[in-house]
Amino acid sequence: MEDSPSCSSVGTALSQVSFLQKTLERLASTQCLKLRAEEAAPVAVIALQRYLSEPAEGQLMSTYSYDVTVTDGVWRAKCFVHPSLNHLAHTNVLRTGTDIRITQCSFVYNEKILGHGYICIEDLRCGAERSAILPSLRDITSLVVLVKPGMERSVALQTDVPLLMSRKHYLPLWNNDDPEGDFWTSRCPSSDPVLDVSRITLLDHLESAFRSTSKPLPLLVKIIHKSRLRYYGKVDLKIDYPYQAYFEVADQSGIMSLVLWNELCPEFYGRLNVGTVLYLQNYTLKQSYSNRSRPQMDHHKMKNFNSVEICLNPRNPASVITVVSPSSVLPQWRLPEVSYQFITRSELETLPLNSARDVIGLVTFVGRVERVKSKANKGPEKYWTYRWIHAVDGTSEHPFILEVFSSSQPEIFNQISPMTYLVCTQMRVCQMEGALPYLTSSCETETFITGYHKGQPYVTDHKVRSFIQWTKTLKDDIVLQKTTVSGYYCYPHPLQRCPQSMADASAQAHLVAAADLKRELETLQYREHKRLGIQGQITAVCYTKTFRSGESEETEVNEVPGVSTDACEQAVPETQSNPSTAEQPSETGSASPSAERISARTRKRKALTEETTQTSLDYSSVPAKRAGPRLTDVQEQEEELGDSESVEALNVESHPQLQNQDSDVLSWESSSWVKQRQELSEHLRQGGLYEESVTRRYSFDEKDVLGQQSNLQATRWTPEQSADSVPAVVCPGYYQVTILGINKKIAIDAAYFPVMTSDDPRAVGLPQEPHGNTMLSCLSTGFLCPLTDKTNHSEGTLPEPDEIIATASELEDTHVVCILDLCHLGGDKVEVLISKVYRVTELCLDKELQKDTCSFL
């Protein structure tokens, strides 16, 4: 065993009985160890790390391997996860912060390397949501690393290196483009070197020197744009650090692309920022790669040299990169200033599509982090990580709607929260018919939040200064009431008319068969989002009500009902559980199926969200009168951006608890559903609503736990992960809708919870033409009419769920197209939500669309 950094830890480890130690000792005498239930003691997962697999004979596609570090509270051990268990990592069943029981394992020696071997976990059982071991551990690094005798010098067991030692580094757990691991720590020089700038060349000379065989002179340039990292590793690629990053650099003569290659990326990527000045030697020139995105740079009003790019390589030749400190930069070098193209929200509608602009705003909504699979077929399977954000700047009643992808800045991306000043550069303008424009990331987008503004070149931009002046007029307690986090959110909303392009797989929501939908559900990975359309009939609807504490003091439940459909099954027990006895009700009560299943109670009409609706804020006209002390976070931001106004923290009340009332269930089903259910080949029952689906009010007291919940599962466990419980959500209820596929072989349950208040982030940009609040019109529009708005003293009342359910009979035998949003929430939780329903018969009556809409029927 290796020496522990703490003598007391060694003594403790040697004196206690350790499951991991006993298991390793037993592996010395057997090839494969299978443990009985009583032998498999729990161990806690403290790290789960991913990397590209080693090439195997006949392997065509690249795959990934996983190392898991576990502890029994006495020792810690890094183990290899057998590939047959990879699906547990893909679905976030195997994750940090939980306990597992190892039921089968083996010890594998590396036959090509002396003194290296590892435990391979071949089977395991996952335990409870929270670990029973970890709460008592505060310093994991003090635990002794368990190593087989004779392998104490194994680097992979005791450092941040994969167990399959043909790979030199780990990848991020959920994407390929973020820096991950200790080897990305930049080494800063101890002092400024002396630069010889007497003989340098300018960028405009490099194009003519491209074919020259002579060694090019040094360059002195400033970075004006920075791209995210690109990982191009493949299973058979013999490069240890297959990374690439593009920069746009400029001098007095113009702008040219610079490419940082391979192991230079871990060493320099974090140090090379917009505004950084570089002195470059031993670089090479090559013809530019044309099939790549480029930042829009017309506003720099400088010549772009696009035929040649500068390459910085770790060898052949080894480039010399000198980062010049700001204090050493001289005016006579005549390096250009970094310029931006900031826009206000009021200017967004006038911009052409696909143009790139910079934005700054006060964040009011931060969505959960989701993933989408890259459509590129080259190399290993890749996912992009992204989140939706709303930010306001006071120039419009609408916020910026931002689709922000991870930009190789995980320390910023994971910390975006309401009430911070967010800067996003090089965001591209997008818009769909009938929707508000939104902005999405480009490869050159960078994001900055509180703690990262200071020293950035944009702090002197006049629109940034104007924005800061506007924020001084805000009443912060009112703004805070408007802020929300997490929950289901997808933009743009589906088109009001069903497009013919749904038959195309590249469409926003393409049409799939019911059997294909089943495969999509089975292959979804953790936090992967997909939007699909399915044809069929709605055969059943049930409404489950939830309410907050204060209405009842008997029980408190922190979760919205999940995938279980128990509540709906209780409403119609015979038809759900016993098809053989379910025919009788249909024969005796087919004349009025909805009336039999709707509660006979009549309630006084009231707004379902009366207590949950918070005061709204018209961001375009906030009075200058202040509302007491300002926020500490705002003080940090203003100091970073050049304002030193003194501010203090604001206390905010947390959410009340959410409770269930399982007995309060309303339902309807079609007259033919009983018979159709007997003839089904499969009923997919993922139609519940999870607490992760519901947006939460933001509060500073719960900032950390809300951030953990809306971010992806962490690669490494920290004590803070389990310090707080997740605050309760507030949701009045939801509808569970059963959709029968058009060929009546497969049915699927989907949840529907309509927008009911203008405070809901989903209300932004949602077409809100008045409708009759029937079940079909609600499903078609996505909201209850009219949306409540307390700020504007809207006194309109929303219909009660039983009134909506009473109109569900119009769904009988109606041919519809349902747009579904799918998202894997981890474990066995798969979110299936209805975002829109199209009635096909109405669409085909439209002469302009008749041919198109019927082409995919």
Image: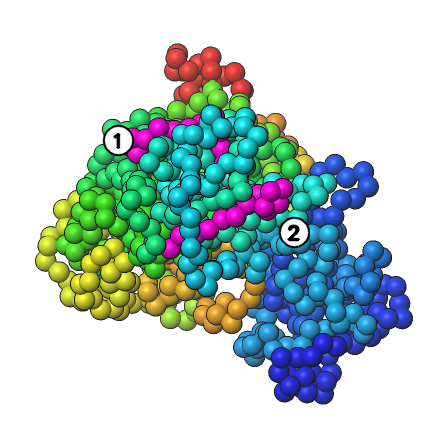
Residue type, label 1: Glu
Q: Residue at x 34, y 54 (%)?
A: 328
Q: Nearer the viewer, mark 2 or mark 1?
A: 2
Image quadrant in which you'd find residue 76: bottom right
Front residue of this view, candidates 184 and 136:
184
**The C terminus, quarter of image:** top right
Residue type, label 2: Tyr
Give coordinates of residue 238: x percent, y percent.
70, 43
Q: Which residue is mark 1?
A: 349
**Residue 669 shown in magenta:** no
Front residue of this view, candidates 426 and 856:
426
Q: Which residue is mark 2?
A: 51
- What's the magenta region? 299-325
User: Which one is earlier in the sequence, the residue at label 2 or at label 1?
Assistant: 2
Is the residue marked by circle 2 packed among few (<14), some (14-19), or many (20+) residues within 10 Å?
Answer: many
Number of numbered callouts drawn: 2
Above or below, 211 against 17 in this view is above
Is the residue marked by circle 1 packed among few (<14), some (14-19), or many (20+) residues within 10 Å?
Answer: few
Q: Residue at x 50, y 36 (%)?
A: 216
Give coordinates of residue 550: x percent, y percent.
33, 67
Give coordinates of residue 832: x percent, y percent.
51, 43
- Left or right: residue 358 compared with residue 82: left
Can residue 111 be seen in this snapshot? yes
**The N terminus, quarter of image:** bottom right
Above or below, 734 against 13 in this view is above
- How far is mark 2 from mark 1, CA to CA? 43 Å
- Left or right: residue 39 compared with residue 345: right
Can residue 383 be seen in this snapshot? no
